Amino acid sequence: MSLEKDVIAIIDVGKTNKKVFLLDRDYHFTSEETSTFEEISDEDGDTCEDLMALNTFVSESIARIQKDAGAHLKAINFSAYGASFVNIDKQGRPVTPLYNYLKPYPAEIQQDFYNKYGGEKSFARETASPVLGSLNSGMQLYRLKRLMPETFGKISCALHLPQYLSSLITGQYFSDMTSLGSHTNLWNFDTNDYHEWVSQEGVGKKLAPIVSSDHAAKLESKKGAFVCGIGLHDSSAALIPYLLQSTEPFTLISTGTWSISLNPFNTQPLTSEELAADCLSYLSYEGKPVKASRLFAGHFHEAGVRRISAHFGKSTDFYKDVKFDKTIIPVLRDELGKTISEKDQTYNSGEFAFHRRELAAFKNSEDAYSRLITDIVIQQFHSTRRIIDQQSNQTI
C-alpha cells in the first residue's frame, strides 16, 4: 500500500520572496518553503531579477517534489508579479534580462508614444491604467523596438512572468487575461481586445495566443500523469477563492511589495481623477474588469525599517520583536502627526510619507516603527477608500 499523498504544488514568485506551497486534496497546506535571491544588473546597470537563478529555483523545486517519497504530484500552477516580460527566441532562450518594472523609462520615447496614440489621459482611460513607464509592461517592448531593434527582432515570443514559469515545465507558450489586464498598456478595456498600437508596432506578433486562465497541460512523470496550469498574475489570483465563495460584495487587499485593493463589484468606469490617484483596472480570471488601487506598502516598510535600523543601530529584523502598544498610537497621531497631516498622506501610491520624518524626534526604534506602521495604515486607508463602495458597507 502506497504511503504517498496526492499534492498540488503552487510556486509563487514575488518581487521579494519566492515560495513553494504544497496542498492536499482538501486544499490544506502540507508544506511551505521560502527563498530569496540577490538581484543582478541589466545592460544599463539597473537592478533586475536573476532569471537564471529563478529558472534553477523552479526546476529544482519541482524535481524535489517529484522525488519526495511521501508526495504524488497531481497538479502544479504558478503565480507571479506582473509588469514583467521574459523575451525568448525560437529555441526558448531569453534574449534580454528580466527587466525590473521600476527601471527608469526614457522620457522622450514615452512622450512620443502617447502623442502618437491619443495623449496620456485618453490612452490611460482606454487601457485602464495610469502612465507608469516600465510598470506598463507593454512599454518595455516598445522601448526595445525603439532603442534595441536588433534585439527586438530576435524575440520570438514575449511571455509575462507567470506564463514563462509555466512554459519551463510544459514547453508551451500562452498569454493569460490576468496578466494582460495588469496595467500593461496592451489591453483596450473599451473594446475588450488588444489596443491598436499593439498591431501597428508589430508587438502583437511577439505575443502568445490567449487561452482561458484555467487551461492546463497534461504531462507525464515517473510517478504518473499530472497537470500544469498556465500561471496567473498574483494579485488577480488572490481574488479567485473569494469570487468563487462569496455571495456578498467585498474588497480584497492583497499585500506584498505592492498592496493592491481590488473591488470586483465596483463597475463604474475609471475617472481621470481616479487614474491620477493611481487607480486602475485589472482583469479577473474570467476576463471581467476589477477596479483597483495600489500602494507601494511593502517597499515603504522595507525602506522605513532600513532607515530606522541604521539610525538606532539595530539589526534590520528588529521590528519582528516590536509589540503593538495601543497607548502610543494616539500620541503619535496627535503630536508627531502634526508634522505630516493625514491630508498630506493621500497622495500618489508611490510616495512615502515616513521618509519625511525626522528620526531624532523618536526616543527609540520601537516608537519610530510604530510611527512607520501608522503612516502606512493611514495611506492604506486612503488608497482602499478610493475604490470601495462607501454606500454598500462592503466587507474587506
Image (cartoon, helix red, strand yellow):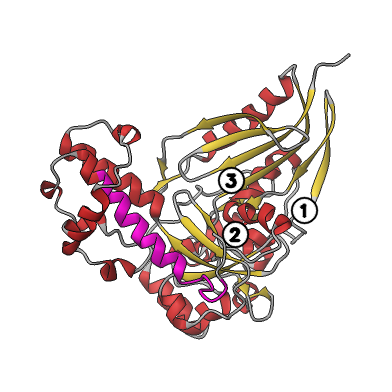
Q: Amino acid at mark 1?
A: Asp
Residue ID for mark 3: 94
Residue 175 visible at all = no
Judged left or right of residue 326, residue 356 is left
Residue furthest to the left in view is: 360
User: How many other residues sit within 10 Å of disc 2, few (<14), some (14-19) or many (≥20)?
Assistant: few
The local secondary structure at tag 1 comes to loop
When asked about the image quadrant of residue 348, the answer is bottom left
Residue ID for mark 1: 214
Q: Which mark is residue 194?
A: none
Q: Which mark is residue 153?
A: 2
Q: Amino acid at mark 3?
A: Pro
Q: Amino acid at mark 2?
A: Gly
Return the x and y of residue 332 as percentages of the image width and height.
21, 54
User: How many other residues sit within 10 Å of disc 1, few (<14), some (14-19) or many (≥20)?
Assistant: some
Highlighted magenta segment, given as a residue range? 369-392
Taking the spot 53% from the left edge, 37% from the top edge, the residue there is 18
* Magenta stretch encompasses residue 379: yes
Q: Earlier in the sequence, mark 3 or mark 1?
A: 3
Q: Nearer the viewer, residue 253 or 147?
A: 253
* Magenta stretch encompasses residue 383: yes
